[in-house]
Image (cartoon, grey):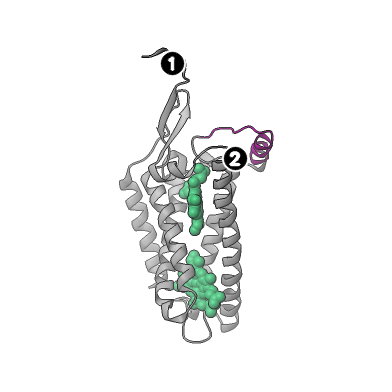
């Protein structure tokens, strides 16, 4: 080994994101584009419904995966109190960049918020109507007045979702341009380069993810049958 490389600080390449979490993320991004496009005219409303069911399955999958999935996907491993998020924010303001194997305490809250808004979006869609010919599959469960109200929430919540997504992408850009940390590459490859010797998180088998996906599919299928 050359002297130069001896002097270098060691870097560990660690698998931090499992395949199910990455597939969840990028499929969700594609589906959100489909949902936006398909909501724009009634001819594409069929796609909108199917895309909406798919979002619901994905979010349900992610919620269960947050309980039984890999270490970095579990809510118990990354959701911390507001104090931790504030301390992280202060550290960022001082110009520091505390390193995390998975999500940092601020990112964690934005993820909880994104999942909540996505659930509201897909949930209200099930009861929505367009006053012409399109109705969500659970439209019959409520009165026309309640369906109209939920349709209003469906439209308003979408704007909140767009705002949060803009903040989310803005945060990723901030890390890239200001902190010089590329978070997108790990979300694609699953791997992070971290200084020092780092203990890899426990990633569970993809078979478990498949079982969770089947459960989420069955639950949504049963709901909208
Ligand atoms: C996360 C997933 C979803 C997103 C992002 C989304 C987005 C939207 C948006 C932006 C509109 C408003 C279009 C407008 O202003 O004219 C809309 C309308 C609508 N969506 Fe969704 N939607 C989702 C899921 C669903 C689901 C699961 C259903 C039902 C199965 C659904 C049913 C409807 C219906 C019936 C309308 C027409 C209401 C109206 O005229 O505004 N959506 N959706
Ligand atoms: C429709 C738009 C998007 C939604 C709804 C969304 C949602 C999410 C969610 C729920 C997570 C948490 C992942 C998990 O633990 O399961 C996440 C993480 C992440 N997203 Fe997105 N995302 C969107 C767009 C994007 C885009 C366009 C990029 C790239 C520019 C991106 C980059 C990332 C990265 C890098 C992470 C991991 C952050 C970290 O290291 O803590 N996202 N996103």
In front of the other: 171 or 146 = 171
Residue 156 horizontal/vertical position (percent): 61, 69
Q: Secondary structure at mark 2?
A: loop
Q: Find residue 154 and name its label.
A: none
Residue 207 horizontal/vertical position (percent): 30, 47
Q: Which region shows up in magenta? A: 84-100
Q: CA distance from mark 2 to mark 1?
A: 28 Å
- The answer to whether residue 122 of the structure is visible from this angle is no
* Quadrant showing the N terminus: top left
In front of the other: 205 or 9 = 9
Label 2 CA crowd tier, 10 Å (few <14, some 14–19, many 20+): few
Q: Is residue 136 magenta?
A: no
Mark 2 or 1, nearer chain start = 1
Residue appearing at x 37%, y 67% in the figure: 221
Q: Find residue 178 and name its label.
A: 2
Can you identify the residue that label 1 sits on?
4
Q: Is residue 212 above or below residue 124?
A: above
Q: Quadrant of residue 61?
A: bottom left
Residue 145 horizontal/vertical position (percent): 60, 82
Residue 32 horizontal/vertical position (percent): 47, 63
Residue appearing at x 36%, y 57% in the figure: 215
Q: Is residue 91 magenta?
A: yes
- The answer to whether residue 163 of the structure is visible from this angle is yes
């Amino acid at each position: 080994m050359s002297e130069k490389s001896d002097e270098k600080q060691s870097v560990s390449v660690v698998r931090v994101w499992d395949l199910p979490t990455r597939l969840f993320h990028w499929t969700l991004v594609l589906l959100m584009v489909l949902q936006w496009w398909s909501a724009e005219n009634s001819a594409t409303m069929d796609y909108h419904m199917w895309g909406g069911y798919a979002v619901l399955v994905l979010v349900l999958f992610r919620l269960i995966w947050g309980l039984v999935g890999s270490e970095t996907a579990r809510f118990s491993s990354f959701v911390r109190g507001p104090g931790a998020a504030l301390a992280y924010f202060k550290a960022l303001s001082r110009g520091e960049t505390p390193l995390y194997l998975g999500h940092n305490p601020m990112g964690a809250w934005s993820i909880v918020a994104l999942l909540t808004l996505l659930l509201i979006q897909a949930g209200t869609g099930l009861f929505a109507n367009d006053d012409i010919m399109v109705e969500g599959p659970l439209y019959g469960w409520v009165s026309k007045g309640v369906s109209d109200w939920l349709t209003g929430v469906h439209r308003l919540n979408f704007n909140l979702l767009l705002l949060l997504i803009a903040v989310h992408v803005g945060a990723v850009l901030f890390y890239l341009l200001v902190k010089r940390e590329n978070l997108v590459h790990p979300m694609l490859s699953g791997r992070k380069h971290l200084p020092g010797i780092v203990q890899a998180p426990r990633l569970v088998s993809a078979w478990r993810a498949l079982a969770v996906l089947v459960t989420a599919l069955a639950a949504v299928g049963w709901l909208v049958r």
